[in-house]
Amino acid sequence: MAEKNVATYDKNMRPNAIREEAFSWYSPTDAPFHVAGLPWFTQEHLYRRFPKHPPFPLSEAVDYLADNPAGGQIRFQTNARHLAVRVKLSALAGMVHMPATGQCGIDCYIGGPGQQRFLSVTKYDLTQTDYECLLMDAPQAEMRAITLNLPLYQGVEEIFIGLDHDAEILPPPAYADDRPLIVYGTSNTQGGCASRPGMCWTNILSRRFNREVINLGFSGSGKGEADVARNIASIPTPGCIILDYEGNAGSVLLRETLVPFIGILRHAHPTVPMLVLSVTRFATEMVDENLVETRRKDREFQRETVETLRRQGDAHLHFLDGAGLLGGEDFHESEAMG
């Protein structure tokens, strides 16, 4: 007797398979597709957040995590009724506290600026590193703006976009501003532990402001290294830079690195707005009052640092207290989030 599970009784829990013959396959490296959030993609055609051989050396952890294309997006318009993806991952899904749809999946949003809505996410056989999934099955052909959000915690070796054979493909709608927003941080930035890529907060920010957002969150490894700052500084014409790495640096490293990190970025981008964001509250604060006091001291250090640098003439530097950003339930699980 075949083994039964919930998918036996609920078809929505089954992988969303495709009919191979129904599609023409396209590479996102070709026009008119636009790959956003991966600054070196045009030169290297790699789904990677730093160059394969960066100008300044990266730690082993940051180099490994740079292969996770968190915040990367594939954007285009098409009148196709059907849309599918063919994906080759670097490894199997295997995180103990994050859904495979967030770790390894791709989700699809449709709609132009200010109107993007979630449509679907890849559901596939988790025992495989290669998958093909249907993301759109529409009854009528009409021109739609498409955004595909890339996996948050797994390397991607190949992606192909499947569309109806007669589908028209156009460039995506223009951004409100061509200057990207850059966010440097921890797993909280990278997307741990979002249920699917579109729920990573940098992707939410991208939809809300119709801007490209470059996600440079490195899980457990956002520690304010000077060479990371130098690589970030090489990204041309940013519109804003957000620093959200307190959660990994801790009190000691934060005090050692914050001013030099800001200084490296400011030397390259003298007038770009820069925001220092303090950490959200951790759930463990409910049982350890020492953590509350540590967060308070680290928050005040960052606030005072920004105020001092502003008095010294940096009018484009700002501070935001992150403790209240998530409303009344503003905790994240420290062990899970890294």
Image (cartoon, helix red, strand yellow):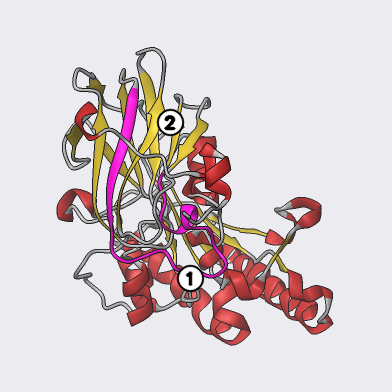
Quadrant of residue 284 within the rendered picture: bottom right
The answer to whether mark 2 and mark 1 are in CB contact below 8 A is no
Asked if one can make out residue 241 in the rendered structure from this viewpoint, the answer is: no
Query: Which label belongs to residue 219?
Result: 1
Query: Which label belongs to residue 176?
Result: 2
Query: Hey, what amino acid is under mark 1?
Result: Ser
Residue at horizontal 27%, vertical 37%? 34
> What range of the chain is rendered magenta?
82-106
Residue 249 or 83: which is nearer the viewer? Answer: 83
Residue 148 % position (x, y):
38, 39
**In this rendering, position of residue 278 left or right of residue 219:** right
Q: Secondary structure at mark 1?
A: loop
Residue 248 % position (x, y):
55, 76
Residue that protrudes farthest toward the front in the picture: 1
Residue 277 % position (x, y):
60, 61
**In this rendering, position of residue 321 left or right of residue 105:** right
Screen quadrant of the C terminus:
bottom right
Asked if one can make out residue 286 in the rendered structure from this viewpoint, the answer is: yes
Q: Residue 173, relative to residue 293: is it above or below?
A: above
